[in-house]
Amino acid sequence: MVSSPETEKFSLKTHTPSTTHKKVVIELLDRKTIRGFLNPSRLAHAEVLELLTPDGEREEIDLVKVRAIYFVRDLKEEFEPERKSFLSRPKLDGLWVKLRFQDGQILEGVIPNDLLTFLDNGLHLTTPDFNSNTDRIYVPRSALAELTVLGVVGIARRKPAAAAAVAAAQPRLFNE
C-alpha cells in the first residue's frame, strides 16, 4: 500500500493517553476519610482533586481541606501505618524527613532527593511501615506545620581529594 499525506492523516492516533487511577483514602483536616480512586499524575499542580468514589460518582475536593492522601493496596483495610518513625536509619535512597502536621502529629518518611519535587503542592512520602496497607502518602504543603530533614540516604559521593588520588594512581598511556 502506498502512503500519501491523505492516508497518513487518518492513520495517526488522535486519542488522549489513558490514565491510571490508584486506590486512595483521603484524610481531611477534620479527620473524616473518603475512599476512592485518584489519578496521581494530576497532584503536582492541582488545587482541586477529582476523586472517583467506589460507587462510580465523581467528587471534587479542595486540596487545602486535605490532610493526607494514602495510596493503599485495598480500600477496605486500615490505611494508617502503625509505625510513625523508623527504628534505625532507612535504607531507601532519598531524604529522611520528619513531618509535623498542623494538628501536632509527627510522621517520618523518605522523600525523593530532587529539588524539582519541592516546587509541587506537596510531598510524596514513603512510610517506615513497609508491611502496612499503605504504599505511600501524599501530604499537601497546607497540611504541614514543619518539615525537618533528618538525613540524606543514598550513594556516597567521592570526595575531591579521593578522586584526585585515584586519577594520579592510574598509568598514563603516553609519556607527556
Image (cartoon, grey):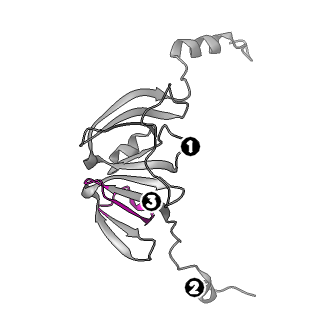
The x and y percentages for residue 174 are 73, 16
The residue to which callout 1 is attached is 131
The residue to which callout 3 is attached is 24
Residue range in magenta is 28-48
Q: Residue at x 48, y 35 (%)?
A: 94
Q: Nearer the viewer, mark 1 or mark 3?
A: 1
Q: Nearer the viewer, residue 106 or 144?
A: 106
The x and y percentages for residue 112 are 46, 40
In the rendered structure, the answer to whether residue 87 lies left or right of residue 57 reads right
In the rendered structure, the answer to whether residue 101 lies left or right of residue 130 reads left
Q: Nearer the viewer, mark 3 or mark 2?
A: 3
Amino acid on which disc 2 is placed: Lys
The x and y percentages for residue 30 are 25, 54
Query: Disc 3 to disc 2, how far (Cα)?
Result: 40 Å
Q: Is the C-beta separation of discs 2 and 1 under 8 Å? A: no
Q: How busy is the neighbourhood of tag 2: few (under 14 within 10 Å), some, or many (20 plus)?
A: few
Q: Residue at x 68, y 12 (%)?
A: 176
Amino acid on which disc 3 is placed: Val
The residue to which callout 2 is attached is 9
Of helix, strand and loop, which one carries label 2?
helix
Query: Disc 2 to disc 1, how far (Cα)?
Result: 51 Å
